Image (cartoon, rainbow, N blue to C red):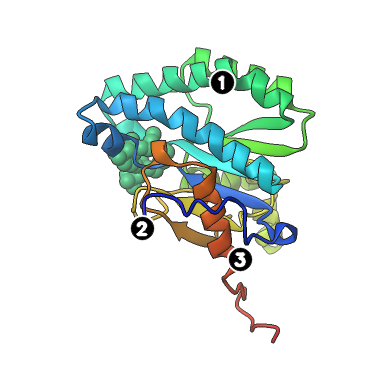
Amino acid sequence: MAESADGKGIEGIDLSKVPLHIGCVMDGNGRWAKRRGLPRTEGHAAGEVALLDAVEGALRLGVKWLTVYAFSTENWRRPPDEVRYLMGFNRNLLRNRRDELNEKGVRIRFSGRRDWRVPRSVLREIDIASELTKANRRLTLTIAFNYGGRAEIIDAVKAIVQDGVSARSVDEKMISSHLYYPDAPDPDLVIRTSGEYRVSNFLLWEIAYSELVFQDVLWPDFRAEHMYDAVREFQGRSRRFGGLDDD
Ligand code: IPE
Ligand code: IPE
Ligand code: MG
């Protein structure tokens, strides 16, 4: 797929069949910066505009759930300076954007482990933004932060064991109900930018039947138009869930 979007706006999209839930793996910030001779952190900074535009796109389409991958449980492997930058960046993003997101009817939620590695100042901003926006229902923006799909499954299994659930009672519903957000529908569509063809531990359980769209655009260049392209591609696909087409 080309790096630039088609520029067709929402033309050709059937608004009665937009994905209920879109997931985004926001990848390519470092390469975006490198191409410009800038430090990697500048790429993360430039990703803020892309995130806000993705939210605008979701609102325009009437998407109800948008989950974005901001920091994985594996991203702690990065140099300490970059990790520190990402922590501060996410904290400031929340602080600076929570009011405008709130005014737009966006509910902000966090998905991930609140472990000792996440600075308290970040946890505090997470709590403030979540509390401020908790009554909003136009769009639920879930920020996957210190998130790993395997960690989420491990945490679900632990909770199930702690609840004393018998082996006989373990089924898909039981596991789903112990994930971080049992109320969220599984993503219909997952978009990954930067031309990488992998899921990198994003929502492993939930994406069992998601449609995957890979785009070459680097995350800081991502705009609502790219989301529209992905939704057009999604609408051209036939989802069978293991069965057969209706026709
Ligand atoms: C995605 O961009 C942001 C995070 C993973 C936090 P990257 O930082 O992975 O950018 P590339 O993949 O190195 O270009
Ligand atoms: C996935 O991107 C994680 C986020 C976008 C937060 P990575 O850049 O960390 O993934 P890999 O290392 O290329 O698989
Ligand atoms: Mg990357």
**Residue 41 — which label?**
none
Query: Badge 3 local density, few (<14 within 10 Å), some, or many (20+)?
Result: some
Asked if residue 194 can be seen in this view, the reply is yes
Element class at badge 3: helix
Q: Disc 1 marks which amino acid?
A: Leu
Query: Badge 2 local density, few (<14 within 10 Å), some, or many (20+)?
Result: few
The residue carrying mark 1 is: 94
- Cα gap from disc 1 to disc 2, whole angstroms: 29 Å
Q: Position of residue 67 (x, y in %)?
A: 58, 42
Say whether marks 2 and 3 touch (CB < 8 Å). Answer: no
Q: Residue at x 70, y 32 (%)?
A: 106
Quadrant of the rendered image containing residue 39: top left
Q: Residue at x 65, y 83 (%)?
A: 245
Ligand 1 image position (quadrant): top left
**Ligand 2 within 8 Å, label 3 CB:** no
Of callouts 1 and 3, which one flags the residue occurring earlier in the amino acid sequence?
1
Q: Residue furthest bottom?
A: 247
The residue carrying mark 2 is: 197
Element class at badge 1: helix
Of callouts 1 and 2, which one flags the residue occurring earlier in the amino acid sequence?
1
Query: Badge 1 local density, few (<14 within 10 Å), some, or many (20+)?
Result: some
Q: Disc 2 marks which amino acid?
A: Tyr
Left or right of 203 on screen, residue 100: right
